[in-house]
Amino acid sequence: MSTHARRERLLLADLLEGAGPDAPTLCEGWTTRDLAAHLVVRERRADAAGGLVIPALAARLERVQKEFAAKPYDELLRLIRTGPPRFSPYALKQVDEAANTVEFYVHAEDVRRARPGWTPREPDPVLADALWTRLERMARVLGRKSPVGLVLRRPDGRTAVAHRGAPVVTVTGEPGELV
């Protein structure tokens, strides 16, 4: 597993463990148990994970996620920590880095920020650059439905065009806030 994705995976698992299975998250309607089940299904059940992007498969995804959510919470955390099985596409280093660094970072923030009194994460410039690289590649897909031009800008001035158009709206923030 890649360095960033692995580190974010372990941090997320620790946050989930510390919060317990019934804590709220910023994922609307999901507890930490639901989020943990989502993460496990995403990496371990390709037959169901298609429901994340194919609406016709969404009911199957929901059914399988509920089955996993019924498992002991410690088992879900163990599966998250150990990572995907060898036959999963997520076991490939390039896929892990591309798909999991942002996924685990965002969900770690979903858990952290749902807790009262949360404080911002200490900035990590290397991780910020990795998140920015992913964001640059995802920007056009994420911004495709914007009714206006959309530019993402880091505080250091680097930009990514998410959608061309006029007028232009520029959203400025650290990469971890923009993802």
Image (tube, rainbow, N blue to C red):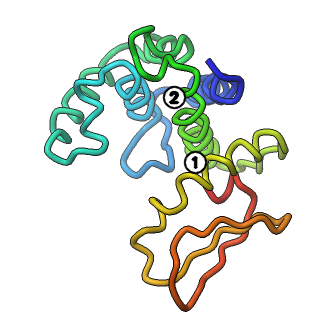
User: Residue 163: where, in percent of width, then height?
Assistant: 51, 73
> Could you tell me which residue is drawn at 29 percent across and 45 percent down?
53
Left or right of residue 38: residue 26? right
Q: Which residue corresponds to mark 1?
A: 114
Name the side, left or right, on which 160 lies relative to 40.
right
Task: Measuring from the top left, give residue 7's x and y in whole percent.
Answer: 69, 25
* Residue type pointed to by label 2: Val
Specify few, some or many for label 2: CA neighbours under 10 Å numbering under 14, 14-19, or 20 or more.
some
Q: Quadrant of residue 47?
A: top left
- Tell me which residue sits at (56%, 36%) in the image: 98
User: Left or right of 121: which side holds 27?
Assistant: left
Picture coordinates of residue 150, whole percent (x, y): 56, 76
**Where is residue 42, by image quadrant?**
top left
Q: In the rendered image of this protein, does residue 92 appear above or below residue 118?
A: above
Q: Secondary structure at mark 1?
A: loop
Q: Are marks 2 and 1 in contact (CB under 8 Å)?
A: no
Screen quadrant of the C terminus: bottom right
Q: Within 10 angstroms of label 1, few (less than 14), some, or many (20 or more) residues?
A: some
Please say if 86 is above or below 24: above
Judging depth in this view, the residue of 82 and 33 nearest the camera is: 82
- Residue 11: give x, y in percent of width and height: 67, 27
Which residue is situated farthest in the bottom direction here?
A: 167
The residue to which callout 2 is attached is 95
Cα separation, mark 2 vs mark 1, equals 28 Å
147 to 134, vertically: above or below: below
Q: Nearer the viewer, residue 82 or 88?
A: 88
* Type of the residue with mark 1: Ala
At a point 53% along the width and 53% down the height, the residue shown is: 138
Say which element carries label 2.
helix
The total number of labels drawn is: 2
